[in-house]
Image: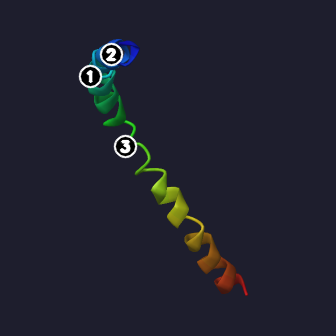
């Protein structure tokens, strides 16, 4: 009986948080994309290093 109650309770709170979470995840996803640009920055400074050589 406890399992049924837990399943019913978890199913109810799960759908609502999942919806807002998906929306909250939408903005953060595009944010991590810009940080990827800096990752490409390291290779850029490496090029000038060779030029300095």
**Residue at position x 53%, y 57% in the image:** 38
Q: Position of residue 37 (x, y in %)?
A: 46, 58
Would you identify the image quadrant in which residue 30 lies? top left
Would you identify the image quadrant in which residue 49 lies? bottom right
Q: Position of residue 42 (x, y in %)?
A: 60, 67
Q: Say how the picture is coloured.
A: rainbow
> Which quarter of the rendered picture does the C terminus lie within?
bottom right
Q: Residue tagged by mark 3?
A: 29
Q: Tell me, for residue 13, which label it has, or none.
A: 2
* In the depicted structure, whether residue 51 falls above or below residue 1: below
CB atoms of marks 3 and 2 within 8 Å: no
* In the depicted structure, whether residue 50 falls above or below residue 46: below
Q: Which mark's residue is nearer the viewer, 3 or 1?
A: 1
Q: CA distance from mark 3 to mark 2?
A: 24 Å
Q: CA distance from mark 2 to mark 1?
A: 6 Å
* In the depicted structure, whether residue 33 falls above or below residue 52: above
Q: Position of residue 39 (x, y in %)?
A: 54, 61
In this view, the residue in front, 36 or 2, is: 2
> Which quarter of the rendered picture does the N terminus lie within?
top left
Left or right: 52 as drawn, with respect to 1: right
Q: Residue tagged by mark 1?
A: 15
In this view, the residue in front, 28 or 12, is: 12
């Amino acid at each position: 009986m406890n399992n049924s109650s837990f399943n019913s309770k978890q199913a109810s709170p799960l759908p609502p948080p999942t919806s807002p979470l998906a929306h909250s995840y939408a903005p953060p996803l595009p944010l991590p994309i810009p940080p990827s640009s800096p990752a490409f920055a390291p290779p850029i400074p490496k090029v000038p290093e060779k030029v300095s050589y």
